[in-house]
């Protein structure tokens, strides 16, 4: 049992590497190459249930072809060919269904099924604002569909199930309601009122707007099934990176529907998986300029003994972060840069240095000063990051600082240090952790 569990987890890892980071999936390829015929068949079934056959097999096929592994290349090619044939048949039937419903006055949106493209789901999942009787009538008359048995849950959710001749995948149509028990009515209307067209294989379908796609995924994963598939991670990562999500609108409608905690948690889970397989942030900068008293910026809000309070709290912050077993090194930015002149850190800076795994500094000064600061910090024999620079009036510019940073092998980031490879998931949308 333990060996089966380990093989299953290794298979999920392989599919995740192949779909999220195919350029760095050599270990995944070697894992697949070492499987028996039966184990590869099991892997293909797992890819099918996770809706990633094409996205996983394509990099496998390319790698096997380059390496001259005819067995793996042929296996992957056959798997993709069979899946493409299924997709072609499914799209033809789905086009007929959609056109029939639209022509009969039943506005319809294809949910989730096409989110996996170039893969596709294992059913045709749809939503319509038409009434139940009309949907059933059109499905019977237009596409010769048969009504399948409905559970009590289906009835509560106003979901109809159909079987169509020549199509092995079932068709599910949600009518005027969404949610486990059909609790979302106003939210559901948005799936038609804000729908967008998507063209695949020269066929046009109505699909939800990006914000509704995130909502649908959240309802399915966080409020119904309570587990994630590889496709959920890949689909959402691609959607986030497309830059098409209006996070203000997403938060507004999620709050309206009472599911914002679920949506935020869903996105955080996706972000964690993406970070795991696509790489890590350079570091976590836990406290920005903790001993910066702000000058006249916050004269009334800052405590008079702020530095004393912060000095007591900063080690606790590092302790709390380390308790989460982070993959990334921790740091806190040094910013005064006068330690070079006095050849010693202040007591507060010494505390930052002692707590930090890597050393981060801020430098709004001439390239010569930047280089001196870096050299001084390198005596601690830890990686050095410059997480703030760029002040033209004193010579701190990209063309002046970056060549020095490259020569000294120091990371230099203008502004603040990014904390994830997918900053859209976190920055400015209430998703920071």
Image (cartoon, rainbow, N blue to C red):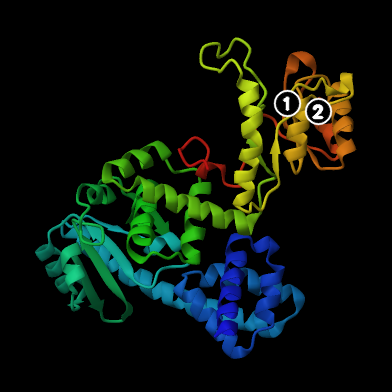
Residue visible at 61% across and 74% down in the picture? 10
266 and 33: which is toward the camera:
266
Q: Are marks 2 and 1 in contact (CB under 8 Å)?
A: yes
Which residue is tagged 1?
389
- Which sits earlier in the primary sequence, circle 2 or circle 1? 1
Q: Position of residue 42 (x, y in %)?
A: 53, 84
- Locate residue 247, reporting x and y percent: 42, 39
Residue under numbered circle 2:
401
Name the one closer to the observer, 191 or 105.
191
Element type where label 2 sits in the image: helix
- Residue 11 lies in quadrant: bottom right
Residue 386 in view: no
- Vertically, is 340 above or below 235? above
- Residue at image x 68%, y 81%? 33
Label 2, label 1: how far apart the Cα atoms are? 8 Å
Residue 433 located left or right of residue 259: right
Residue at point 66%, 51% (across, down): 280
Instruction: Give the residue at x 15% y 57%.
Output: 130
Q: Position of residue 390 (x, y in %)?
A: 72, 23
The quadrant of the image that shows the N terminus is bottom right
Tell me the crowding category of disc 1: few under 14, some 14 to 19, or many 20 or more residues within 10 angstroms, Cα based.
many
Most distant residue in the left direction:
133
Q: Position of residue 252 (x, y in %)?
A: 33, 38
Quick one: SS at disc 1?
loop
């Amino acid at each position: 049992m333990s060996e089966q569990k380990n093989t299953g987890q290794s298979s999920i890892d392989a599919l995740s590497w192949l779909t999220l980071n195919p350029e760095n999936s050599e270990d995944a390829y070697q894992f697949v190459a070492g499987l028996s015929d039966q184990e590869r068949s099991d892997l293909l079934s797992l890819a099918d249930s996770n809706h990633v056959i094409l996205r996983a097999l394509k990099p496998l096929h390319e790698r096997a072809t380059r390496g001259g592994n005819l067995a793996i290349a042929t296996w992957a090619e056959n798997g993709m060919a069979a899946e493409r044939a299924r997709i072609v048949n499914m799209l033809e039937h789905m086009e007929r269904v959609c056109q029939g419903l639209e022509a009969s006055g039943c506005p319809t949106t294809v949910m989730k099924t096409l989110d996996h493209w170039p893969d596709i789901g294992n059913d045709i999942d749809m939503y319509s604002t038409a009434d139940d009787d009309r949907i059933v009538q059109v499905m019977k008359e237009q596409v010769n569909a048969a009504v399948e048995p409905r559970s009590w849950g289906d009835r509560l959710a106003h979901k109809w199930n159909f079987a169509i001749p020549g199509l092995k995948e079932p068709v599910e149509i949600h009518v005027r309601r969404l949610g486990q028990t059909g609790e979302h009515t106003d939210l559901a209307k948005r799936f038609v009122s804000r729908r967008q067209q998507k063209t695949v294989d020269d066929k046009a379908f109505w699909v939800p707007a990006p914000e509704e796609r995130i909502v649908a995924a959240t309802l399915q994963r966080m409020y119904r099934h309570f587990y994630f598939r590889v496709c959920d991670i890949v689909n959402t990562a691609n959607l986030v990176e497309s830059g098409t999500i209006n996070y203000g609108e997403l938060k507004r409608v999620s709050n309206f529907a009472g599911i914002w905690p679920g949506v935020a948690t869903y996105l955080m889970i996706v972000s964690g998986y993406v970070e795991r397989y696509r790489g890590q942030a350079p570091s976590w900068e836990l406290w920005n300029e903790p001993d910066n008293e702000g000058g006249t910026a916050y004269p009334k809000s800052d405590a008079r003994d702020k530095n004393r309070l912060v000095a007591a709290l900063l080690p606790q912050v590092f302790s709390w972060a380390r308790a989460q077993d982070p993959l990334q090194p921790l740091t806190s930015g040094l910013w005064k840069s006068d330690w070079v002149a006095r050849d010693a850190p202040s007591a507060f800076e010494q505390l930052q240095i002692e707590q930090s795994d890597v050393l981060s500094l801020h430098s709004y000064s001439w390239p010569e000063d930047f280089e001196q600061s870096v050299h001084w910090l390198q005596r601690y024999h830890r990686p050095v990051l410059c997480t703030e620079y760029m002040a033209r009036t004193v010579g701190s510019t990209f063309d002046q600082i970056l060549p020095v940073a490259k020569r000294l092998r120091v990371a230099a980031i203008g502004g603040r240090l990014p904390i994830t490879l997918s900053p859209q998931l976190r920055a400015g949308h209430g998703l920071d952790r």
